[in-house]
Amino acid sequence: MFKSLTLVTLISVCLSATVFANALTLSSQDITDGELMSKSQEFTGFGCTGGDLSPQLQWKNIPEGTKSFAITAYDPDAPTGSGWWHWQIINIPLSVTDLATGAGNTKTDLAPTGSMQINNDYGSRGFGGACPPVGHGVHHYQFTVHALSVDNIELPADASGALAGYMINANTIATSTIVALYERH
């Protein structure tokens, strides 16, 4: 009985390790999970004077059935009652597994061909950096890659962050998130 239980436990641990080893993973050269972002990811405007650069992101271990990707950057700590969308980019082709620093700037050609950047909560298309209120404490910026089950999400050019979020979540197979921090004193 003890040998059987030990064998079952060992097999379960090995299978669990395999599942976790093959999970979709997100990494970055510019931001680190649980650590403060640099001034380069701070917004330019509303009293903030940062570089307003979206971070470099890369992902691997793409799940079976993935047809495209979306990236979202969201601050649940914003004092709005509904958080703050800093970035949503959809329709990233399956062949793309990384975004360069600054790909969220719509004035450059760094975003993948065919992708669509949604209006952020600052009211502009593309990435809008961190700009929490002074003295509001540490904010948690969730940068998430979504593996999607569709080639394209069809949205109007003026789609809201909520509509984009709904469509992304409705078609998500797997996600991976980096939670980067930012605070203004």
Image (cartoon, grey):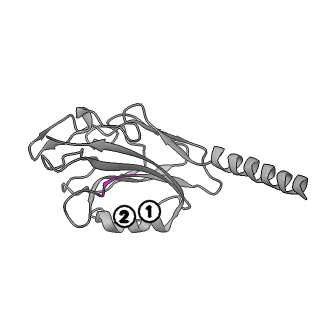
Residue 96 position in % (x across, y down):
51, 42
Q: Is residue 155 visible?
A: no
Disc 2, SS: helix
Q: 84 left or right of 112?
A: left
Residue 73 position in % (x across, y down):
34, 51
Distance of label 1 from label 2 (alpha carbons): 6 Å
- Residue at 28 percent across and 46 percent down: it is 127
Disc 1, SS: helix
State if disc 2 and disc 1 touch (CB < 8 Å).
yes
Instruction: Please give the count of numbered marks on the rendered protein.
Output: 2
- Residue at 36 percent across and 64 percent down: it is 164
| Residue topped by disc 2 | 164
Q: 90 left or right of 131?
A: right
Residue 176 position in % (x across, y down):
50, 50
Name which residue type carries label 1.
Ile
Residue 108 position in % (x across, y down):
29, 37
| Residue topped by disc 1 | 168
Image quadrant in which you'd find residue 181: top left
The quadrant of the image that shows the N terminus is bottom right
Q: Residues within 10 Å of mark 2 (few under 14, many from 20)?
A: many
- Give the number of the disc on residue 159: none
Q: Is residue 14 magenta?
A: no
Q: 30 left or right of 177?
A: left
The quadrant of the image that shows the C terminus is top left
Q: Is residue 75 magenta?
A: yes
Name which residue type carries label 2.
Ala
- Residue at 18 percent across and 35 percent down: it is 50
- Magenta range is 72-76
Q: Is residue 122 visible?
A: yes
Q: Nearer the viewer, residue 151 or 142?
A: 142
Residue 23 sits above or below residue 5 on the image: above
Residue at the far front in the pictured view: 2
